């Protein structure tokens, strides 16, 4: 955290809240003697998107994992159709793909890594991409080097919790907040972990389980397979 804070203060002041908090009256980035480091990071982060994801052309292609040279014309036509459909879903204004990848580019340019989550939107009618602050993330790798467990800290308002999960899943204290101070924050953890590691709770048929935990009241809000 201290390393990321030092990097952010010099190269990415917008993210410089790993170990420090900014007040509304603070002068933004007033500690910098020159804007050159910020401009260097900005140009590098922008270059990632320009080189890897040019919006003027299709920068990715769908392929089969094997036997690509032997598939027929109909299969290739379907794959071409799927490419176009996926591109429209990714670049739909509600998917937040451009915003999430842009934030991820600048996190990667500054800290060498970023955390982007790909899910369905709340109404399950399209994709939703979010780039989370590294300050709130922690993850564990398996023996093969793949990420198997992810923790994310979240401080939603009582109003947002109610609209996301429904009032019936919330602790009575949060319901009281909702009625008296709907924008009061609650400490929540979102955990995604292998389902076979969960000895307790709801059984799921998927490989992973998503659990939202109300840390303030030590209660599970939602537990589903993903």
Image: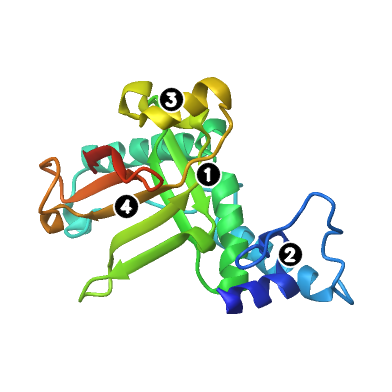
* Residue 92 horizontal side relative to residue 109, left or right: left
Q: Secondary structure at mark 3?
A: helix
Q: Which dot, 1 or 3, sits closer to the camera?
A: 3
Q: How far separated are the C-alphas under marks 2 and 3?
A: 37 Å
- First in sequence, mark 1 or 3: give its number: 1
Rendered location of residue 48, percent (x, y): 60, 64
Q: Which mark is residue 97?
A: 1
Question: Quarter holding the N terminus?
Answer: bottom right
Side (left or right) of 135 relative to 195: right
Look at the image and tell me whether residue 2 can be seen.
yes
Apparent side of residue 208 relative to residue 131 in the rendered image (left or right): left
Q: Are marks 2 and 1 in contact (CB under 8 Å)?
A: no
Question: Which of the two marks, 4 or 3, is nearer to us in this view?
Answer: 3
Can you tell which of label 2 and label 4 is closer to the viewer?
Answer: 4
Looking at the rendered structure, the secondary structure element under dot 4 is strand
Q: How many numbered tags mark residues here? A: 4
Secondary structure of the residue carrying numbered label 2: helix
Residue receiving disc 2: 13
For the residue pair 212 and 9, the one nearer the viewer reads as 212
Circle 3 Cα neighbour tier, 10 Å, few/some/many (<14 / 14–19 / ≥20): some
Numbered disc 1: secondary structure = helix
Q: Which residue is mark 4?
A: 191
Q: Which residue is mark 3?
A: 175
- Residue 64 screen position, x and y as percent: 23, 53
For image coordinates 56% across by 26% down, the residue present is: 182
Residue at mark 4 to residue at mark 3: CA–CA distance: 23 Å
Residue 102: x percent and y percent?
A: 61, 54
């Amino acid at each position: 955290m201290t390393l990321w804070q030092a990097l952010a203060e010099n190269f990415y002041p917008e993210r410089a809240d790993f170990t420090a908090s900014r007040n509304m009256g603070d002068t933004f980035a007033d500690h910098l003697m020159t804007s050159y480091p910020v401009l260097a990071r900005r140009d590098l982060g922008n270059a990632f998107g320009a080189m890897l994801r040019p919006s003027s052309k299709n920068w990715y292609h769908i392929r089969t994992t094997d036997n690509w040279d032997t598939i027929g014309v109909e299969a290739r036509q379907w794959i071409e159709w799927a490419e176009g459909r996926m591109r429209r879903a990714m670049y739909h204004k509600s998917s937040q793909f451009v915003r999430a990848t842009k934030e991820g580019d600048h996190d990667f340019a500054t800290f060498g890594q970023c955390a982007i989550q790909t899910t369905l939107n709340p109404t399950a009618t399209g994709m939703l991409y979010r780039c989370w602050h590294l300050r709130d993330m922690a993850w564990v790798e398996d023996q093969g080097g793949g990420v198997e467990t992810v923790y994310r800290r979240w401080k939603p308002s009582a109003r947002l919790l109610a609209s996301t999960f429904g009032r019936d899943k919330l602790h009575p204290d949060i319901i009281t907040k909702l009625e008296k101070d709907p924008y009061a924050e609650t400490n929540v953890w979102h955990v995604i972990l292998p389902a076979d590691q969960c000895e307790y709770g709801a059984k799921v048929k998927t490989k992973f389980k998503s659990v939202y935990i109300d840390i303030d009241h030590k209660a599970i809000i939602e537990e589903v397979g993903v």
